[in-house]
Amino acid sequence: MTSLVLFGLAAILGTGSSFSSAINGLIGREIGLVKATFLFLSLGTLFSAILVYLFEDNLALSELTSIFLNQPYLLTPGFINSIFIIIIIRATAIVGTTLTTACLFSGQMLISLWLDHVGFAGLRMIPITPARIAAVVVLLIGVTLLSLSHQATAASVVSMQVPRPTKNLFRAQPKACAVVAVLGVGGLLSGANSLNAALGQEAGVFTATLLFLGPGVFLLPLFSMVASPRRENWALKTWRPIYFMPGMINVVSIAGSVFLIPIIGVQVMVSTMFTAKVFTGLFIDGFGWFGLPQSPITRLRFIAALMLSLGVFLSSFYA
């Protein structure tokens, strides 16, 4: 019963994370990518700081300093986070929620195999087995099917419009660089989540969440000034209540991961969240929610989701 409750919590986190990504894509189109990311990190940092104050204010600054002096690598997840959030928002706008989710968590699966096998950051050791290897193969097949279904949908939309030169047809396809970038980000995310879970065991769940989000608030404006030749206008011309949602959902998702990973392991956590995110993403894309391109739930997409779920089942329950 306890295991089912933990899996249920991970599934809820996955569903919420999928909605957060889709809403972030909407906000990015309305106010700009950089400002949307900054808003996402700032609201999440503020919310997690409030939670630290309410529930974990007994941790002295000297104790926290001692943790980082002895284990400085525990600081890295927050710096990585400020980079890959931008990639995820951009990729969601290009290839949709489902494919972004699939690539992100396939990258996580590949790295999670090794992280669990070596007991990375002091977490529980789970050896690589034939079932886990088979799970990764099935997952990659599912990702490929999702990519093919997305390309088929894009091609059918183009064929219904006014004929265009051949080179424009290829521009309508999902960009390979976005898929590769998200796969890489997924690998980084597994390592960052493992380190963050280790930090949570020593400093507290909400403190780890705060330190995961906080560095991005300072690094993102610096990154923007370096990467963009023009001066960024940080003022918001419009504001909607929905802008609060991604930051708050993200805090819950990060805190939940910090709490669950030491108990159920990186691979099972990733697997369970992955299942929930893929099926939620199917509906988000299928109905075109939050202004994302509508991608019908075709037979190929449904088979791809089943393949991904089979990979999750193999990795989680037959390892």
Image (cartoon, grey):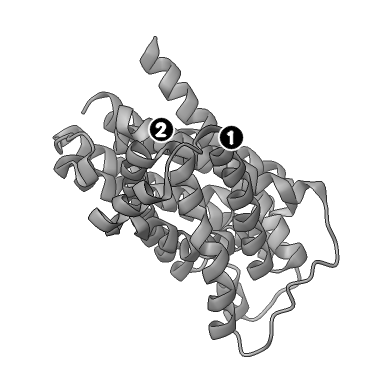
Residue 259 disc label? 2
Find residue 158 and report its image quarter: bottom right
Residue 69, position in %: x, y? 27, 58
Earlier-in-chain disc, 2 versus 1? 1
Tell me if residue 205 comes above or below residue 147 in the rendering. above
Tell me if residue 96 comes above or below residue 223 in the rendering. above
Please tell me whether mark 2 sits on a helix, a strand or a loop: helix
Which residue is at 22% across, 36% downward? 132
Q: Amino acid at mark 1?
A: Leu
Which residue is at 39% across, 9% downward? 1
Residue 109, position in %: x, y? 31, 45
Nearest the eye: 69 or 209: 69
Find residue 33 and report its image quarter: bottom right
Residue 54 disc label? 1
The reply to whether residue 190 is in sight is: yes
Q: Separation of disc 2 and disc 1 at Cα?
A: 17 Å
Q: Amino acid at mark 2?
A: Phe
